Amino acid sequence: MTGPKIIFFILAASIVVFSLLSVLDRRILRAAIYLLFVLVALAGLFYMMNFQFLAAVQLILYAGGIVVLIIFSILLTSQINSKLDAPRKSHLLSGLITAVGGIALSLATVIPFVFKATASDAIGTDMRTIGRQLLDTGEFGYALPFEVISILLLAALVGTIFIARKSKT
Amino acid sequence: MNLQSEIPLQYMVVLSTLVFFIGLLGVLIRRNLITMLMGIELMLNAVNINFVAFNHYLFPHRLEGHFFALIVMAIAAAEAAIAIALIINIYRKFLTVNVDDVDELKY
């Protein structure tokens, strides 16, 4: 066992365990906190793969933004000590069958598959390369998706305000 | 650090498969809108693991998976914001966020 391997197994185990806990825990606020742990461990995984910028975005956007939004909405809509109803037996059974069957099917397909890596040289993942590619209009440029995403975020902003405001009736 | 020799790509794919189906399980067994949203976030994150891992392991000369993961994150943020606005509105009207009790469309 070497260093990266140990770190990977710690991260992977915490991701799987905390996501299971977040799905199965009946105290909803704790479920949100377990989701936060999953997201932070995922940021560590991205960092391991040399995508530092993505890890930072993961921490800021998910851990800092979405989880806080979820916790706010939990506090607005339910009592802090309230427990969720236990899932109905039929739901639990069908959900477990779907999940276990899906995992078995996907793994049976994926594990024997031989992936072919490209032989080209690796590109750096520093901020300069990322920024240039993100705003480049030429080949390997991502200026169009960048602008489309900015319009989507603006639309989401306006739509959210419109939906959530109190009606004047 | 050469990750390829230490950790095969299959490990990453197995991890993302597990997280994806755990999120699906959460969407299927919970009846509370907020926990269902959390299940969807887990599924989106599982997809992100796959994008980033394939980018790092198979196509390191491009940054496609990286940018795709960034876009998925932005869409997840927009989706969470809209979903929570809807949930707050539903709570104002029905005083519950349980999907079985929310059975009217007209407002």
Image (cartoon, coloured by chain):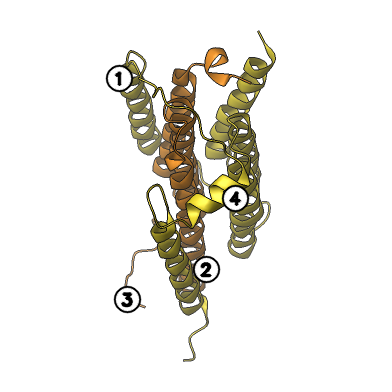
Chain colours: A yellow, B orange
Q: CA distance from mark 4 to mark 3?
A: 33 Å
Residue A116's x, y, as percent? Answer: 35, 20
Residue A124, position in %: x, y? 56, 36
Kind of residue at disc 1: Thr
Q: CA distance from mark 1 to mark 4?
A: 31 Å
Q: Is residue A5 above or below residue A62?
A: above
Which numbered tag is attached to residue B88?
A: 2
Labels 2 and 3 positioned on one and the same chain: yes
Crowd tier of the residue under label 2, counting other residues whose Cα lies within 10 Å: few below 14, some 14–19, many 20 or above: many
Mark 2–mark 3 CB contact (< 8 Å): no
Q: Nearer the viewer, mark 4 or mark 2?
A: 4
Residue A62 numbered mark, or none: 4
- Asked if residue A38 is positioned above or below residue A127 in the image, the reply reads above
- The residue indicated by pointer 1 is A109
* Chain of the residue displaying label 1: A
> Residue B73's x, y, as percent?
50, 51
Type of the residue with mark 2: Ile
Residue at disc 3, secondary structure? loop
Q: CA distance from mark 2 to mark 3?
A: 16 Å
Q: Give the residue at mark 3.
A: B106
- Foreground of the two, B90 or A112: A112
The secondary structure type at the circle numbered 2 is helix
Q: Is residue A110 left or right of residue A17?
A: left
Distance CA(mark 1)–CA(mark 3): 45 Å
